[in-house]
Amino acid sequence: MDLFYTNLIYIIPCMGLIGILVMLAKSRWVSRQESGDETMNTLAGYIASGSMAFLRAEWKILSYFVIIGAALLAWSGTLVETSSWVIAISFIIGAFTSALAGYIGMNIATKANVRTTQAARTSLARALKVSFTGGSVMGLGVAGLAVMGLGILFIVFYQMYVVSVGGSVNGAGMEKALEVLAGFSLGAESIALFARVGGGIYTKAADVGADLVGKVEAGIPEDDVRNPATIADNVGDNVGDVAGMGADLFGSYVATILATMVLGREIVSADSFGGIAPVLLPMLIAGIGLLFSIVSTAFVRIKNETDSVQNALNTGNWLSIILTAIASYFAVQWLLPDTMSIRGVSFEKTDVFFSIVVGLIVGTLMSLITEYYTAMGKRPVLSIVNRSGTGHATNIIGGISVGMESTLMPAVVLALGIYGSYYFAGLYGVAIAAAGMMATTAMQLAIDAFGPIADNAGGIAEMSKLPEEVRRRTDNLDAVGNTTAATGKGFAIASAALTSLALFAAFVGIAGINSIDIYKANVLAGLFVGGMIPYIFSSLAIAAVGRAAMDMVQEVRRQFREIPGIMEYKAKPEYEKCIAISTKASIREMLLPGAIAIIVPVLIGFSLGPEVLGGLLAGVTVSGVLLGMFQSNAGGAWDNAKKSFEKGADIKGEIFYKNSDPHKASVTGDTVGDPFKDTSGPSMNILIKLMSIVSLIIAPHIAVGPSANAESSGIKKQASPIEHTVKPNSISLLGKTDAEVLDFRK
């Protein structure tokens, strides 16, 4: 048992490695599936090459950002004792890994799309298996890279800054180790923001152009091969909803675990791991969630054409949550001591488990609420369908109303979750609740990523003129995919709220302030500025989509007008020109919104101090969470209202189909909702966490006093503080002998 205790830290990256190995096996299985006829493969080749062209252009620009950012971090790391230039290395690794996570998802998606189309020629069950396996490759890749990367870097930095000097587990060495590890999260979140915004601009510019000119003006199907923007639209599904989403969830996953580790450092813990059990717990929970997500993917299946795809996905999701909750209980009971304290507040290990359960419940409820507001056949979407019967304006009004209403229950659930997790284990409880919520990220992302794959599969089926039953099966998957995409975004935004509170608490401690006093005029001003930032960020992102979409609309109209024979299938559209428009626009337009998230905290922090910066973060968090929910849910509801007409929608006893006036009104609503749900809305969670991480990293440079680890208003009984040094078993686990340990000062 002692050997297992001393080597637990090495087990964590091994869990990540297992996830990556399973990912490789699933990727190989997808690649071996039939890819259809020559036409299907040609179209899939256009999509794959367009996707890679975008990523290469994006990576070229972001490489400059990474080099400059790393240089600044290396320089700043030499200015204060609690920092280190090594943070620049950590930042580069985080940026690279985030980009790799996006590439893994996009690479498999561009293989799985055409294979899903081919599978749909056989059965719905087969198509679901191929598309979901493709999605699970992305989910396991993201979670596996995060767990393995964090585990390995923590071992290295813990050895470097704590063990090698024999420092206190709660002291400056551990603080430096975790601050350097924060560079990994900063790199991941920075790339995620640019990837999500850039990919979102790309996909929505193409989507809007394809919809407005193709469906509304020309009256041809959405994915008709005659539409010049249709290939760019399908490319956008990959670079925005897959590559961008992969980088997004990777950054969110890492930030959540890191926030819990930073607060875990402050806990006084008499455990068998030298006092670092609260730091190890979030990584262990993430590894457990990854393993049970692997198990649960085997249960996502259907047998008949009439079986519910949504129910199959829910089965896998629920199973992963339940198994993770059960395993978390035993992990907490084994890992943590009976009682702990943080900032003078004590709690028990059972309280930590209850906080994890709260996080899992919050994540589940957020998914269910989002599903209700965005799923076909539910009251919110049906209300938009009915309003489409009276025109475009009433459709827009209905969608906005649904989006605003959809913030009510999530806000209540988040508030109760924050209060409940804080009641059980203080600020560490809030952080570990977020870690519990994100533990099943591999499954959540697999469910999310299967949607764009199914969407692409439907496009290939339409462009290849396959039988109607094939498109019916892919449409079935796509409609469910719209809902799962919306629930995934709601899940990510909810995690941002809990994670940002944990990062906020860590920032307060490192910056040496005890509270954020909004009675102070400058702090209140910071609060208002923070509340404004998500709106100006969204404005820039949506305006960028609008400008790019205008260029796309003009290009599609030009081709219809100047290339004779397109409508008669006698001439091939110039797909590459539409791809170029989206690529150039997205690369150009992603820079300013991304810069805001990084530059504003630095300017406010160094010019006005940490307390004003704290007010800014509070405003960004509350405003960004609510605005993100509104935009994501409104966009998802508009999209499925449009799809309702494609199946046949009942408005006051009359059935309306494609190309009817209500359908055209729903297309307008979907066009408005596109940048909401795929560009600005899902970017809110990255914006919130990135600004918090930047603030955490600059905290030592703007600190006004010692770390605020003193008493705070709290819960339960007070505990006497205990100072722990690194124990022999925890040092030997990192390659030190017990004899060497004897020389360390306690």
Image (spheres, helix red, strand yellow):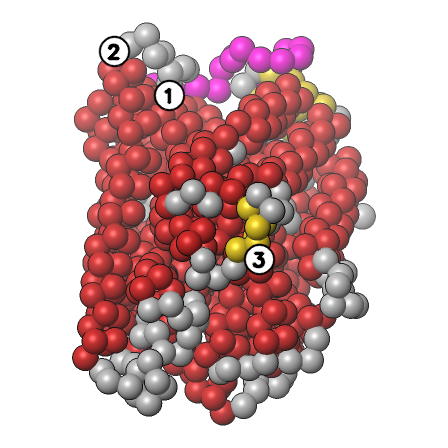
Q: Residues within 10 Å of mark 2 (few under 14, many from 20)?
A: few
Q: CA distance from mark 1 to mark 3?
A: 61 Å
Residue 470 in view of the camera: yes
Helix, strand or loop at label 2? It is: helix
* Amino acid type at image mark 1: Gly
N-terminal label among 2 and 3:
2
Q: Nearer the viewer, residue 137 or 655?
A: 655
Does 624 lie within the magenta span? no
The span shown in magenta is: 702-721
Residue 648: mark in rendering: 3
**Image quarter in which the C terminus is found:** top right
Residue 438 in view of the camera: no
| Residue at image coords 70%, 75% | 123
Does 707 lie within the magenta span? yes
Residue 512: mark in rendering: 1
* Circles 1, 2 touching at the beta carbon (< 8 Å): no
Q: Position of residue 588 (x, y in %)?
A: 21, 58
Q: Is residue 302 left or right of residue 218?
A: right
Q: Position of residue 262 (x, y in %)?
A: 50, 35
N-terminal label among 1 and 3:
1
- What secondary structure is the magenta-colored segment mainly? loop
Query: What residue does disc 2 label?
Result: 521
Q: CA distance from mark 2 to mark 3?
A: 56 Å
Kindly give the residue lying farthest to the bottom in the view shown: 38
- Note whether 559 is above or below 142 in the view shown: below
Residue 309: mark in rendering: none
Helix, strand or loop at label 3? It is: loop
Q: Nearer the viewer, residue 549 or 720?
A: 549
